[in-house]
Amino acid sequence: MSDNKSRVAVVTGGGSGIGAAVAEQLSTAGHRVAVLDLNTANAEAVAASIRDAGGEAIGLTVDVADRTSVDKAVGQVREKFGPIEILVTSAGVDAQTPYADISGDEWNRVIGINLTGTFNATQSIIPDMQAGGWGRIVTISSSSAQSGGPDRAHYIASKGGVIALTKALAFDFSPQGITANTIPPSIIATPMADTAVQAGLLPKLDDLAMMTPVRRTGLPEDIAAAAVFLCSEQAGFITGQVIGVNGGWYI
């Protein structure tokens, strides 16, 4: 799939997993991509891979929970590529703690990265989209925000907030040509999922695959394909939507 023109795209959490796949597919669609991640080496590696494949990309360090860090990275993107027209917020952190044991610091950390981080990125970038009269925002939430789950109240609350924030953005900015949609993945084979399995917080992915209606776990590329479509010219009539890419986990 290719858009009618090359646009400037930012992907937070673009150094691995879903974010990396989104960055790569946005480049394949012809866009100039800024890969933002807390892990500098990962961000630069994904950007280098895109450049090696013939695309235009830069890798930048960002802590999405820190507004100053976000604004600095966004400024660097503007200096390199110009106004930003596409934003995919994939940066996030998982967490699993019994409700009674969630400390205030842990609550604030999860909300700060997953929800406030999404707020920081969108608020920093939307002025570019308003000025150009065109924009695409795709947030990555979680199917657990739709169905609940054990010992993950802070994570679920943060991702539920992402869904609600996305709907608010769609209501406020769609009249200005800016769409906002969210993708809530289920079980996706990512480094984050592998870490959870190794820590005993998640069953083996092969076992989860047998519980999934399509009989496999998701791949980062599955999420990326939907995200890139939602960022396209063709998706201009889709906004405020929760687009489940979950193999049937949540129907």
Image (cartoon, grey):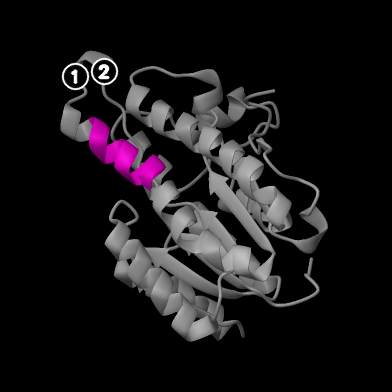
Say if residue 21 shows up in the picture.
Answer: no
Horizontally, is 171 left or right of 158 in the view? right
Horizontally, is 40 left or right of 202 in the view? left
Asked if the residue at tag 2 contacts the one at tag 1, i.e. Cβ–Cβ closer than 8 Å, the answer is: yes
Give me the residue at 78% from left, 53% from top. Answer: 235
Give me the residue at 48% from left, 85% from top. Answer: 80
Say if residue 204 shows up in the picture.
Answer: yes
**Within-10-Å neighbours for mark 2: few <14, some 14–19, many 20+:** few
Q: Establish if 6 lies above or below 222.
A: below
Q: Establish if 55 lies above or below 113.
A: below
Q: Is residue 114 magenta?
A: yes
Callout 2: SS: loop
Q: Position of residue 169 (x, y in %)?
A: 58, 44
**Within-10-Å neighbours for mark 1: few <14, some 14–19, many 20+:** few
**In this orientation, which residue lies closer to the viewer: 218 or 166?**
166
Callout 1: SS: helix
Residue type (three-letter) at the residue carrying disc 2: Pro
Look at the image and give the residue range highlighted in magenta: 107-116
Per the model, the C-alpha gap separating discs 1 and 2 is 5 Å
Q: Position of residue 236 (x, y in %)?
A: 78, 54
Which quadrant holds the C terminus?
Answer: top right
Give me the residue at 21% from left, 23% from top. Answer: 102
Q: Position of residue 170 (x, y in %)?
A: 64, 44
Q: Main secondary structure of the magenta part?
A: helix
Horizontally, is 53 left or right of 194 in the view? right
Residue 185: quadrant of the picture = top right
Which residue has dot 1 on it?
A: 101
Q: Position of residue 113 (x, y in %)?
A: 33, 45
Give me the residue at 44% from left, 19% from top. Answer: 149
Q: Is residue 109 magenta?
A: yes
Residue type (three-letter) at the residue carrying disc 1: Asp
Which residue has dot 2 on it?
A: 98
